[in-house]
Image (spheres, rainbow, N blue to C red):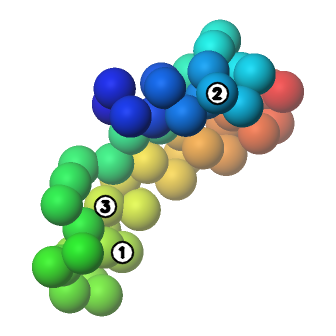
Amino acid sequence: MTAARAQAAALGRADFDAIYVAHPIQDQTRQEIEARADAVIEEIAARLIDS
């Protein structure tokens, strides 16, 4: 989360409210990654619609 906040600030978006996915992901199976994406997809869609 700290790295995401730092990256957003570096890109001029310190106010950016990120959606976090549990890590690590690099050692996950496709199904495990899809499950993590499914867990946040509604929040992502809601933010895109509200923006």
Amino acid on which disc 3 is placed: Arg
Q: Could you say where residue 1 lies in the image, as x and y percent from the top left?
A: 33, 31
Residue sitting at 62 percent across and 21 percent down?
9
Judged from this view, the residue extending furthest toward the top is 15
Instruction: Determine whether 19 is above or below 41 in the image.
Output: above
Amino acid on which disc 1 is placed: Glu
**Disc 3 target residue:** 36
Residue sitting at 18 percent across and 78 percent down?
28
Question: How far apart are labels 3 and 2 at the CA level?
Answer: 27 Å
Query: If the image is split into quadrants, where does the C terminus sit?
Result: top right
Q: Front-most of 24 and 12?
A: 12
Residue 16 shows in this picture: no
Q: Does label 3 or label 2 sit earlier along the sequence?
A: 2
Element at label 3: helix
Question: How far apart are labels 3 and 1 at the CA level?
Answer: 5 Å
Amino acid on which disc 2 is placed: Ala
Q: Could you say where residue 25 lies in the image, as x and y percent from the top left?
A: 24, 67
Instruction: Determine whether 3 is above or below 37 in the image.
Output: above
**Disc 2 target residue:** 10
Element at label 1: helix
**Disc 1 target residue:** 34
Q: Could you say where residue 27 lies in the image, as x and y percent from the top left?
A: 15, 79
Instruction: Determine whether 20 is above or below 51 in the image.
Output: below
Asked whether the beta carbons under mark 3 and mark 1 sit within 8 Å of each other, the answer is yes
Q: Quadrant of residue 10?
A: top right
From the image, state whether disc 3 or disc 2 is nearer to you: 2
